[in-house]
Amino acid sequence: MKTWLLAAVFAFTSAIVPVALADDGDIQKTNLYPKVKFVTSMGEMVVELNRWKAPLTVDHFLKHVVSGSYNDTLFHRVVADFVVQGGGYERDWTPLPEGDTVVNEAGNGLANNFGTIALARVNDPHSARRQFYFNVQDNDRLNPSARRWGYAVFGQVIENAELLHELAKVETGFNDDLGFPDVPVEQLRLISVELLPEEK
C-alpha cells in the first residue's frame, strides 16, 4: 500500500468545536471490558472494548457513544482489504463537531488486526478525536514501531465480525461534493452505537 493512501485514509477532519459528551458516571468507568452494539444499515455486531489496555481511548469513545453522537451517521470511507471508517459525518454529509483530542495509546500491545477498532487521526500522533475505523485485515503498517507512532486499537469485534467483510465490499468511488475518494456510492449508515448493560 502506498504511503499517500495510508495518510489520506485518516486525513478527513471536521470543524473543531465544543461537543456535549456524557459524564464519567455514564460510561461504566469501573468496567474493564465494556461492550457496545453497532447497528448498521447492513447488520449488527458487538464490540468489546479494552479499558485495561486503552483506558483514555475507551473513555473518550464511550463519551461519544453514550451522548448519542454516533447515531444516524455514516461510514464515509471504505477501502477494501484495509479499513471501514466512520463517525465523522451526518447523513447529509455535514461534518460533525470533532471535540477534544485524546492521547495516543498505540503502544498498548493491541495490534491493528482484523476485527479490531481504532481511532483515526491525522499526522500529529495525538490528533485523534471522534472518527474511528475497523480493520478488515491485519494492518501491520498501522502499528507503532521504533520510528513511528501507530494508531490506537481499543477493542475487538466479538459478535458477527463477518459483517466487516460485507461492509468492505460495498461499491465506492470519488465523491465530487466532498472531494474524497473511497466513499460508498450508496450511503453506508451507522444507525446507532449502544453501550450494553454491564454483565454482573
Image (cartoon, rainbow, N blue to C red):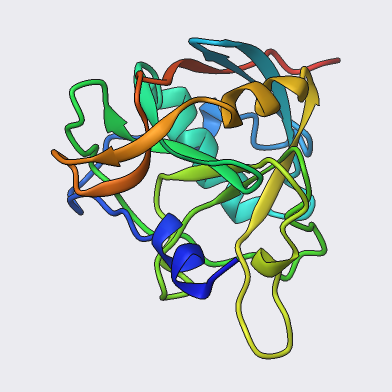
Count of marks, rendered view: 0
Residue 2: x and y, percent? 54, 70
Residue sitting at 16 percent across and 41 percent down? Answer: 176
Name the side, left or right, on which 193 lies relative to 29. Answer: left
The one of 141 and 193 positioned closer to us in this rendering:
141
Residue sitting at 58 percent across and 45 percent down? Answer: 83
Quadrant into which the C terminus falls: top right
The one of 46 and 81 positioned closer to us in this rendering:
81
Residue 86: x and y, percent? 44, 36
Residue sitting at 75 percent across and 65 percent down? Answer: 140
Name the side, left or right, on which 163 lies relative to 96. Answer: right
Name the side, left or right, on which 73 lies relative to 90. Answer: right
Quadrant into which the N terminus falls: bottom right
Q: Quadrant of residue 95?
A: top left
Residue sitting at 25 percent across and 21 percent down? Answer: 91
Up the image or down, 55 lies above or below 161; here it is below
Up the image or down, 165 lies above or below 60; here it is above
The one of 173 and 144 positioned closer to us in this rendering:
173
The one of 70 and 177 positioned closer to us in this rendering:
177
Residue 46: x and y, percent? 71, 20
Up the image or down, 197 lies above or below 183; here it is above
Q: Hey, which residue is sitting farthest right in the picture?
A: 200
Up the image or down, 5 lies above or below 18; here it is below
Q: Is residue 88 visible?
A: yes
Q: Is residue 10 visible?
A: no
Q: Hey, which residue is sitting farthest bottom in the picture?
A: 147
Name the side, left or right, on which 109 lies relative to 70. Answer: right
Residue 97: x and y, percent? 23, 42
